[in-house]
Image (cartoon, grey):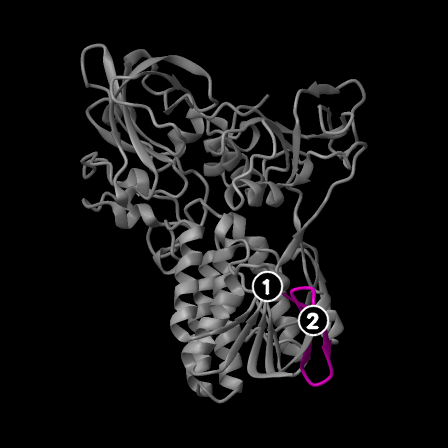
Amino acid sequence: MIQTELAIVGAGPAGLSAAIEAGRAGAEVLLIDENARPGGQLFKQIHKFFGSRAHKAGTRGVNIGRSLLEECDKLGIHTCLKGEVCGIEEGQNLWVVIDRKRSEIVKARKIILATGATENATAFPGWDLPGVMGAGAAQTMINVNRVLPGRKVLMLGSGNVGVIVAYQLMQAGAQVVAVLEAAPRLGGYGVHTAKVSRAGVPFHVSHTIKQAFGYDHVEAVEIVELDSSFNQIPGTEKILDVDTVCLATGLTPLTELAWLAGCEFKFIPALGGHLPIHDDRMHTTRDNIFIAGDISGIEEASTAMEEGRLAGINAACELGYISDEEAKLRTKEIWDSLNSLRSGYFGLKRRNSKDLMLQTGKEVI
Amino acid sequence: MENSLKITGAPSLEELHRSPAYPPEDRLKKGPIAIIECIEEIPCNPCEASCPSGAITIGDSITNLPRMDFEKCIACGMCIPACPGLAIYIKDYNYSDTKALLSFPYEYYPLPKVNDIVQAVDRNGNILCTAKVLKVRNLKSNDHTAVITIEYPKEFFEEAVNMKRL
């Protein structure tokens, strides 16, 4: 049995930011992550981040990750790596399987779930061939493990993940044969698509994959045009010579622990599906359980870090390390920062969905 | 097919001409100037602070489009590596009688070398012409965004934005 004041599950941008705020306030923090290294997806984000200076704009994600880890080290945050949290028992006991060998119970007074998200797959004939993978998986291979998954890549999905990974695959030496988008308009930021476009990569809107061919790996892909109801238009098929297919078709929050803990949920499609209801402190409907990052709705690292700070500050407040007034003041400041990240055309849907969640949180919590 | 940012991935000249940061033609051809191809309201403002002449304004709401004071811009190039979207470059129409100058961000290896002959490309990656590399700047403060300067025939002045990957 390990006892701690605050246990944080997930050492990505949200979990690290939460640990830093709570640790700085004086709380005893244990950060648990199933991976061998902390940082979540930050260390594969080799591009410069957007936002304002306060959001570390212009800094590459990998360097933001490094500075968060340094800060955690300075504060003496305890970390438990290769620790899979497999359950939450009554009274905030976490069941952790460490190194796939032994299990340990962590008894925490407060818990922050910052478990992130998982990539959505898209099924088509041949999708089980080696060479078909999530865009995030390809990004891990090239930027963390320095392995090029293939030479000729087809990207399915033109959201920011799709176009950023397409660009990074070219930086790693691959050719991106095309980017497909099922919708009639491209999804990602125009500055990202423009970067990929001027590298000579064609974008095909209203297109999807009909099937992938190959004996023991992807050798070609048949693409097809879609009508306005997303039905395939017969006769529009084309064969592309590719050896790798990357799926960038959205993410789903990893909410299992929140379900196990008995948190109440709300279904908000614009944020990725079923989400634990939370208030402006990132507190769920269960006493002592907070959430932060993609588990509370699919966004990006900049917003995850701000939400982590919210959860860390408010958990530390409940533990008595920060006064109510100070926590309230800082909570408001962080929400102002979050709202600025969620403004404009791209942020509007997320802003409205988050407002809806906060409204629900206010009513139920 | 409609030639626009959300269809082809690259902004068209018509879309750019409507944006508040794209210089009007007389200014464009008057002398060196920074050109910002940022036509969507995204939450981002490092260009504003990077400009030592105060020529670029975003303002309080970080999703505002960048606005450019075309008279204040001295084409120093500080904004090129500062833009996380790699959406800023500098052009000089009057570099010589026949050649224009383009300085653009470049994040691929290998980097070109000074005096290399490279291929200039348009916004859709089409090869326009050959160009000569005049400068390769990759200062530590650029954080791995190299800035490449090329000279290229004036007739491709507006179309050229970058070079074909080596």
Whole-percent x, y for residue B60 in the image = 35, 57
The reply to whether residue B63 is in sight is: no
Q: Is residue A228 visible?
A: yes
User: In the rendered structure, which amino acid carries the disc numbered 1?
Assistant: Lys
For label 2, the crowd category at 10 Å Cα-Cα, with few meaning under 14, some 14 to 19 and many 20 or more, is few
Magenta highlight: main SS: strand
Question: Where B45 sits versus A275, above or below?
Answer: above
Crowdedness near tag 1: few (<14), some (14–19) or many (≥20) residues, C-alpha within 10 Å = many
**Which residue is drawn at the image coordinates 19% and 11% (left, top)?**
B97
Q: In this view, does A217 lie to the left or right of B119?
A: right
- Would you say residue A339 sits in the magenta stretch? no
For residue A102, which numbered disc appears in the image? Answer: 2
| Chain letter behind tag 2 | A
The residue beneath circle 1 is A354
Residue A340 % position (x, y) = 44, 59
How many angstroms separate mark 1 from mark 2 (CA)? 39 Å
Residue range (magenta):
A83-101
Position of residue A279 in the picture relative to residue A67 (left or right):
right
* Number of numbered tags placed on the structure image: 2
Residue B140 in picture, x, y percent from top left: 27, 43
Q: Which of B136 and A236 is in front in this view?
A: B136
First of labels 1, 2 by sequence position: 2
A139 sits left or right of A256 in the view:
left
User: Of the residues shown, which amino acid type is indicated by label 2?
Assistant: Arg
